[in-house]
Image: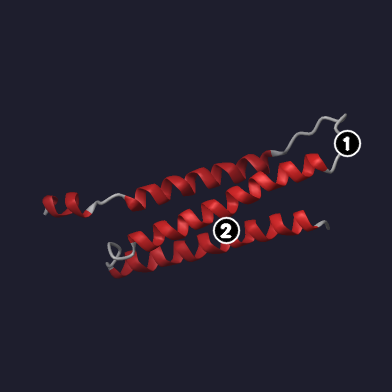
Amino acid sequence: MKYWQIATLVLLLAGAAVTLVTFLVALISLCRGTHRRHYRMVAVFLFTAVVLQACALVLYPIKFIDGTVLQTYHEFNWGYGLGWGGTIFMLGGGILFCLRTDMYEDAMY
């Protein structure tokens, strides 16, 4: 394995680990009823995971095409698109956790 492949793998696994920790923190705080206190922390974790995964998803095709002969045509499979889709959805989740919903929830009761 080349060094850029290891770096890409480490970035993706670190992003997945941060996402898992974020999910567990959000789930535990939701079950305890203290979810408002943890919105900011969950959003920061999600943005961290987005940065890690976006770096990996940009690094991979640049180094892959750099290391191959340019006369051949390369296509990335559906997993690469799935990675970008997950990254975009995590970015959306981080943005949603940054919104202040406590102003609207108190008016309902």
Q: Which residue is mark 2?
A: 15
Task: Check disc 1 and give the amino acid type.
Answer: Val
Q: At 30% from the left edge and 70% from the top edge, which residue is drawn? A: 32
Q: At 49% from the left edge and 66% from the top edge, which residue is drawn? A: 21
Q: Is residue 57 left or right of residue 6?
A: left
Q: At 35% from the left edge and 60% from the top edge, which residue is drawn? A: 40
Q: Secondary structure at mark 1?
A: loop
Instruction: Return the disc, 2 or 1, that comes first in the chain's sequence.
Output: 2
Question: Where residue 17 appears, x then y in whole percent?
Answer: 56, 64
Whether 41 is drawn above or below 8: the answer is: below
Q: Which mark is residue 41?
A: none
Question: Where residue 49 appears, x then y in whole percent?
Answer: 53, 56
10 Å neighbourhood of mark 1: few (<14), some, or many (≥20)?
Answer: few
Task: Check disc 2 and give the amino acid type.
Answer: Gly
Q: Secondary structure at mark 2?
A: helix
Task: State the CA–CA distance, disc 2 to disc 1.
Answer: 30 Å
Q: Quadrant of the N terminus?
A: bottom right
Whether 34 is drawn above or below 78: the answer is: below
Q: Which mark is residue 69?
A: 1
Question: Where residue 67 appears, x then y in whole percent?
Answer: 84, 43
Q: Is residue 101 left or right of residue 69?
A: left
